[in-house]
Amino acid sequence: MSDCISHSAPEPVFLEPWHAQVFALTVSLNEAGRFSWADWVAQFSATLRRNGLSRELDGGADYFNAWLETLEAILAAAGNASPQEVALVRRDWEEAYLSTPHGEPVHLAR
């Protein structure tokens, strides 16, 4: 009798690379003392409520768009990144990823 061993890869924790990146950035900024985790939770919860995301979220785009919105708001409120700076970086990022061949890493010119 032969033993059949099946192997399966674990499910990804994040659906998109940017989800992991914005999560890691948030944790890093918290650990650097830029904001407390209690403040983060309060503001993130408010963002979810404001966007009508009261249902159970699966960690998809709506969840991480709210996560990014919260991080941008916290950084703007602390004077670390103005809405204008965020808009410029967002524009530069969009130009960079639209001009990058599929499968290649995206690099910002700045």
Image (tube, helix red, strand yellow):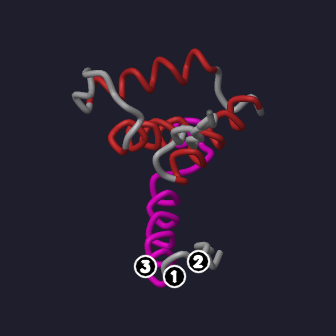
Residue 98 in the image: state x and y as whole percent.
43, 79
Quadrant of the snapshot with the N terminus: top right
Verify CB contact (< 8 Å) between mark 2 and mark 1.
Answer: yes
Q: Closer to the camera: disc 2 or disc 1?
A: 2
Say if 71 sits above or below 39 in the image: below
Tally the numbered discs.
3
Residue 95 is one of the magenta-drawn residues? yes
* In front of the other: 56 or 1: 1
Q: Earlier in the sequence, mark 3 or mark 2?
A: 3
Q: CA distance from mark 3 to mark 1?
A: 6 Å
**For residue 15, side relative to residue 17 (left or right):** left
Q: Would you name the residue on which mark 1 appears?
A: 100
**For residue 35, side relative to residue 68 (left or right):** right
Q: CA distance from mark 3 to mark 2?
A: 11 Å
Say if 52 sits above or below 11 in the image: above
Verify CB contact (< 8 Å) between mark 3 and mark 1.
Answer: yes
Q: Which mark is residue 98?
A: 3
Q: Secondary structure at mark 1?
A: loop
Q: Secondary structure at mark 2?
A: loop
Q: Which mark is residue 104?
A: 2
